[in-house]
Each structure stands twice: as structure tokens, then as C-alpha cells.
Amino acid sequence: MKKRKVMTEKNTDPALWIFILYLALVVIMYRLSPTITGALILGLYLSMIIMVPARLIAKIKFIGERASLIISSILVFAVLVVTVYQIFPIVYDEASKLFSTLSSTDISIEELLAQLPVFLRDIIGSGKSNDAVTEQLSNLISTFTSYGMNLMNSILPMIPNMLTAIVIFIITATYISTLKPVFRDNLWRFFPASTRNKSTGFVREYYNSIKTFISGQLIIAFIVGLIVGIGMTIAGIPYAVFLGFLAGVTNLIPFFGVIITSVPAIFLALANYGLFGLIRVGIVLIIANQLESWVLSPKIQGDRMELNWFVILLGILLFGSLFGIVGVLFAVPIMVFIKEFWKQYVQDAFRRN
């Protein structure tokens, strides 16, 4: 009996292999069907975003948990619909105006240089160098115009399908939110009886870490949106408030807010102010991106998730290259999972053996 007891103590916790199996299944599913699996993962992420305002709404008297979820889902849905319906007309109108101007106007290097600050004109120079710049610029404008018009013509027919996909996406996220109590009550079924309490406790603790990550990302998104909105207003770019709103909403996916906002911002800058407007927009977006990369994310997410800021940045780049947007979105949660899983299961297995 003593020998059998010693052997039992040395056995590895079976939940270690269960978690590895579940993680491997997710990776395999994503590799086999990235669109469906990615949509499910994004739906899960959005369902947790819905839970943030739902918890606040539930504190109001006479509003139950289910009603707060419905109200929160409607609010999130409205924000996304407004964003989509605003961005496409703006991008299409400004891009069409820009490409029409470029294709119908004989633009000279002197006209473009006149839009730049004096110090940039001095750097570019004059004389023979302008002839080479003019030739390259003419080729660039011709290529840019042709590509832009083709791009806009291909995007326009896709808008109805994209709106339909967003509607389905929101419905899926709302449905996952309503299933949370069911999953919570049946969580024990996914683990062996011998380690059930520890495993369910680990999952609940990890779920709380994800909620902490999402609340931190909401704070970052709000600050980035504020920076972009104020910066675009100072730069004199049209639709500055909307650009800030767009940057905040899309920055719920880490670092994507500035990237997505750059598309309409560049068209607005070029169509209204030319190259000098493009420089102003670039300065605003670079400042927002650098503040997020080196100040906001390391300070807010690093402190909350107890991870080094360089590890966060490296993980986002690594998982983003492996799994695309889904990888960027879940880089920090995956790193937190690996850290906690290593502490509670792998190190425990090392001690046992």
C-alpha cells in the first residue's frame, strides 16, 4: 500500500494533457478552417466585450442579467453598424475625388513641392534632380490612380456581404454570451474527477485574467481614439471626430486602430490638403502608434497581466505572423495561459517526477 501511494503521488496530473489536447484541437481547427474558427474566436472575444457594459447595466434596478445582455448587445451592435456605415461612404467619396483629380490633372513637380514646408523643399532640391523626381512621380501617380480605382470598384460590391457578416457575427457573439451560465455550470464535465476542482479553478482564474485584459484594452482603445481625434482636429483633417471614434473602436484589436484609421485618414488628407496634409496625418498616426506601443500597452496591459512589456510586444508580433488578426487579438491571453499553465501544471509535474 505504501509503494502504491508513492507511485500515485508521482503520477502527472492528467489535466496537463487534457489542456494540451484542447489547445491542440483549437490550433488544428484553425489550420483546417481558419475562417470559421477565427469567427468563433472573435465571437467569443466580442461576447466578453459585451459583458463589460452588461455588468454596469445590470446594476440598474429592475434590469436583470438577461435584459442587461440584450441591451449591451444592441449597444455594441449599434456602434459597429454606425462605424461601418460611416467609413465606407467616406473612403469611397474621398478616394473617388482624389483619383479623379489625379487622373484628370497634369500635376507638375512644382505644384506638389509648393504644398510642402520650406525645409522639405530645400532637402529635395531643384534643377536636374526635379526632372528625375517628376518622371518617377508621374509613374507613381499613374500606377496609384489605376490601382485605387480598381480597388474601390472591387470593394463596393462587397459592402452588402460585409454588413451581413457583421450582423451574423454580432448575433453569434450575443448567443455565446447567453450560453455563459450553461458553460459555467457544466465546466466540470470537461475534466477527470481526480483533478476536477483544480482544473475548474484554473479555468475560472484564467477567465478572470481575460476579463482583466479586455478591460485594459478598452482603456487603451479609448485613449488611442482620444489622441487620434484631438490630433486630427489640430491637423485640420475633415471628419476628425469620426476618425478618433474609428480608431477607438478598431483598437479593441491591439494596434489595429491606427492601421485601419490610416486608410480613410490618408484619403482625406490627400484629397483636401495634398502632400502636406499627408505629412500631418502621418505625424498624428505615428504619435498614436508609438504611445500605444511603448507607453499605454506596456503600462496598462503589462501591469495588469503581470507580463514584461517586451514579451507582450514580441508575442503580438509572433502570434500575429502565425495566426493573423486572431493571433494579434489573443497574443496576450495565450501568453498568460502559457505562464499560468507552466506554473500550475508543468512545474508541478517536474516536482512529482
Image (cartoon, grey):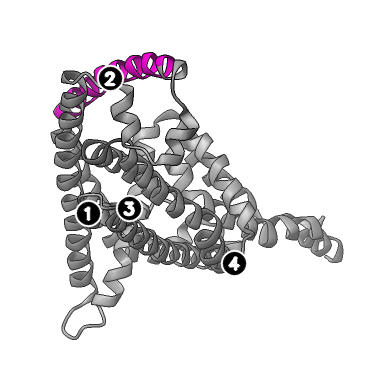
Q: Which residue is mark 3?
A: 247
Element under disc 3: helix
Gap in Å between the C-alphas at discs 3 and 2? 25 Å
Gap in Å between the C-alphas at discs 3 and 4? 40 Å
> The disc labelled 1 sits on which kind of residue?
Phe
Residue at 48% x, 37% y is 323
> The disc labelled 2 sits on which kind of residue?
Tyr
**Is there CB contact under 8 Å for labels 4 and 2?**
no
**Is there CB contact under 8 Å for labels 1 and 2?**
no
Dot 4, crowdedness within 10 Å: few (<14), some or many (≥20)?
few
Image coordinates for residue 109, horizontal then vertical, percent? 33, 23
Residue at 64% x, 59% y is 308
Q: Residue 242: give its label.
A: 1
Residue 316 appears left or right of 133? right
Image coordinates for residue 66, horizontal then vertical, percent? 21, 70
Q: Which residue is mark 4?
A: 198
> The disc labelled 3 sits on which kind of residue?
Ala
**Residue 124, relative to residue 26: is it above or below?**
above
